[in-house]
Amino acid sequence: MKSISANCRAALAALFLTTAGQAGAQAPAPDYSAYPCLSYTLDCGKLATRKPQVKMLEGTLNGNAEKGKQLAQARNNGNCLACHVMKGGSQPGTRGPDLSHYGSAGRSDAETYTAIHDMRTRNPDTLMPPFGTNGILSDPEIRDIVAFLQASK
Amino acid sequence: MRLKIRTLVFAAIASLGTTATVAGDEPYHENYPQAHIDPARGVNGDIGFSDTLPFWRTEAELERNAKWVGDPNEQWKLNWKFMDLDRVDLHPGHLAVDEGEAMAAKLAKRNPAFLACLADGGKKLDGLAAGYPKYDKALDRIVTVESRIEQCAKTVLNEEIRQGTPPNNKISVYFKSLSAGTPIKVDIGDGKVMESYRRGEQLFYKKTGQLNFACASCHVPGSIMGHKLRGETPTTPFADAAHYPTYRTPIGALESLQERFARCLGQMRTAQIKPGDPAFTDLEVFMTVLSNDYPVSVPSAR
């Protein structure tokens, strides 16, 4: 049985080393019971999904691109980088389209805002979380991210 | 004729994907579009699903594809199976088996009925774990190896060895190690098992949490599976159940399958449920049927 090559073992040792540092102290889990869950008994098991919501951008954008960049990269926040290649940030995800030149695509602030607020309004089957509808990002935060995307040329 | 076409079109739209359900008073729910999985095919159902099975199914195939280990683009296709059994001989999962054996022996010494309870009335545990989860008629519920340990400790010794705790995991990995190499055979001919499988399947596709993800959002073809999610790449759900409890290197402890579910729930920003919860049991049944015919593969490391 012990046939995996020496090569493979070395790679494994490297893997163990790189993952070993990630343990760290665990923060208490936030409370997500306001969203549907898998339980048969808890109330969240019966909660409805928040319906797709079309939200229009009101007034001018007024976003801060630098703040938007931080939000887009933060794992506990927008974490857009989990699925998109973007300007800056490390270990980007690959499932969504590359957004690192989004600002050159000629998209309006308004359509971008609406999409980030709730992508289901564009694609009911989307994998992208409904950031506005589900309260992951606030209105000013979405504006900041739109500004960051528009500045990505 | 016209009507017929219209119904057909409706049916086509309905079967195309999203699966928001709004029937009568039912609250609005969303499900990830269901992939076709035939439970009778066991682990072979991965063919036509992720199609990675040929890369990790046997020792020889893993050996042939060992070059992918550590390769960020290709490694996910090995479904981490290069870390099972004694393919890695240094990890402490082996020590955990010894510890679990010593614990089980000690408990059996206090009362031999503990062992008999684990062994379904017999004397030996060999090969038994490969038949879990299963329906227990006397208890009228689905039992997993971990819930069996909890229940036997409680009824025979009046001791709490709760699922999802280190002592339970250690006895579990020992119990399962006595089936190492034995093909998993969850009894899908049992109606109660299949009811649980179907419930587990529903849960697998149910979108939950703040991020509105289903398990399937990351673990079926067309989803995030095989794509990078920052540092990680989600893999096929086939054969996952075979290597649990696994020794988790980053935390230096064993982790049961249901504790692993809980970590994915955390990533989904979904309210937690506890090991042994009926919903987790149904998910475990679903996932273990997807491991049918694949050998029990403990001790492993992840």
Image (cartoon, coloured by chain):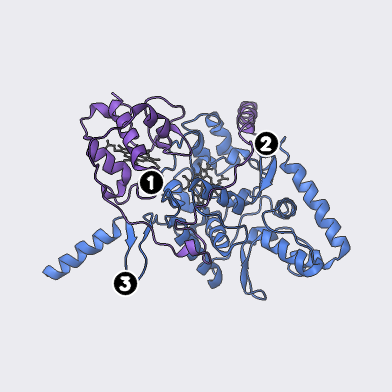
Chain colours: A purple, B blue
Q: Which mark is drawn over residue A129? A: 1
User: Going by the image, does A129 lie left or right of B247?
Assistant: left
Which image quadrant: the C terminus of chain B? top right
Q: Earlier in the sequence, mark 3 or mark 2?
A: 3
Subunit ID for the residue under disc 1: A
How far across and down, in percent of the image, does residue B256 sit?
64, 51
Tell me the mark number nearer the camera, choosing from 2 and 1: 1
Query: For the N terminus of chain B, which image quadrant?
Result: bottom left
Query: Mark 2: which amino acid?
Result: Val
Residue B86, placed above or below residue A39: above
Q: Give whichever of A57, B209 is nearer the camera.
A: A57
Q: Amino acid at mark 3?
A: Gly
Name the kind of residue labelled 1 in the image.
Answer: Pro
Q: Secondary structure at mark 1?
A: loop
> Which residue in the protein does label 3 denote?
B24
**Residues at badges 2 and 1 in contact (C-beta under 8 Å)?**
no
The quadrant in which residue B105 appears is bottom right
State whether residue A85 appears in this view: no
> Percent position (x, y) of residue B98?
79, 47
* B151 vs B238, nearest the viewer: B151
Decide if residue A47 is in sight here.
Answer: yes
Of circles 3 and 2, which is in front?
A: 3
Share a chain, discs 2 and 1? no
Would you identify the image quadrant in which residue B137 lies?
A: bottom right
Please state the horizontal and vertical placement of residue A77, each as a whole percent of the image. Answer: 45, 39
A97 relative position to B227: left or right: left
Residue indicated by mark 2: B88
Please say if the residues under marks 3 and 1 sit with CB atoms less than 8 Å apart: no
